[in-house]
Image (spheres, rainbow, N blue to C red):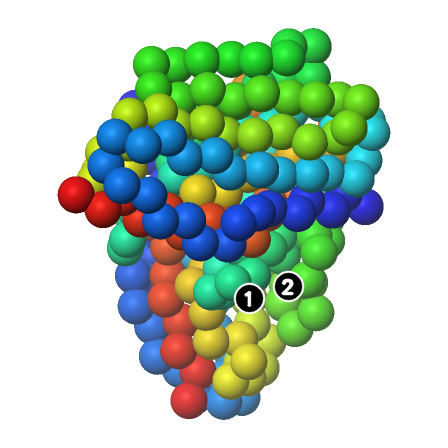
Amino acid sequence: GENVEQHPSTLSVQEGDSAVIKCTYSDSASNYFPWYKQELGKRPQLIIDIRSNVGEKKDQRIAVTLNKTAKHFSLHITETQPEDSAVYFCAARGGGSNYKLTFGKGTLLTVNP
Amino acid sequence: DVKVTQSSRYLVKRTGEKVFLECVQDMDHENMFWYRQDPGLGLRLIYFSYDVKMKEKGDIPEGYSVSREKKERFSLILESASTNQTSMYLCATRIAYEQYFGPGTRLTVT
């Protein structure tokens, strides 16, 4: 089955700096890669996603890049703000039609004012 | 607006008890999922269902079973709760590619 590795497990940045979180996946047939943000005590929420036919996607301060050859994808947050502090999870949907997602172990991002 | 609700936010049960965790969605979605979340381990899939009475094991099904008698409701069952099942349990439903999560149930087994 699919295996997703996520790094780093913790990340601390100064407000205004950029943050990058990286994930690798094992199933070359995987075709959908979402990123979820989970604030303390809240449910995970989708913040951005990318499909395998696209190399990059941007939404304001957030971007995701995908390298299918190397089987890795990354989340980039620019101009970080304290409200970006949360746990971020990457995930991959393997080949097939069951819509199952395999998640990484998460990255705790702390943005220091 | 998608609504995924879970029957309890906090639950305390004793070892050996049978535990039911309920999840209800209001959008007639076919796919529903149960995950457990533990610090440092991320979200791990226990079971999922792609239609009424249809279910499939996820990555960590041992010690759990599920029931889906109606499309809107997906139940997770701990047949005989053990302390290593103390965890946060999250239910999710799917729209297109996206999974929407419920608020979670924090289960403590003593």
Q: Quadrant of the N terminus of chain B?
A: top left
Closer-to-camera residue (B27/B109) = B109
Tell me the SS state at disc 2. Answer: strand
Q: Residue A41 occupies which quadrant of the picture?
A: bottom left
Amino acid type, callout 2: Ser
Residue B71 spot, x, y in % from top left = 53, 37
Residue under label 1: B77
Closer-to-camera residue (B87/A91) = A91
Do the residues at discs 2 and 1 belong to one chain?
yes
Could you tell me if residue B110 is visible in this image?
Answer: yes
Residue under label 2: B65
Could you tell me if residue B36 is visible in this image?
Answer: no
Q: Which residue is drawn at 50% across and 30% down?
A: A75
Q: In which quarter of the image is the C terminus of chain B?
A: bottom left
Residue A25 spot, x, y in % from top left = 73, 38
Q: Residue at x 57, y 47 (%)?
A: A7
Q: Chain letter of disc 2?
A: B
Position above or below: B43 against A45: below
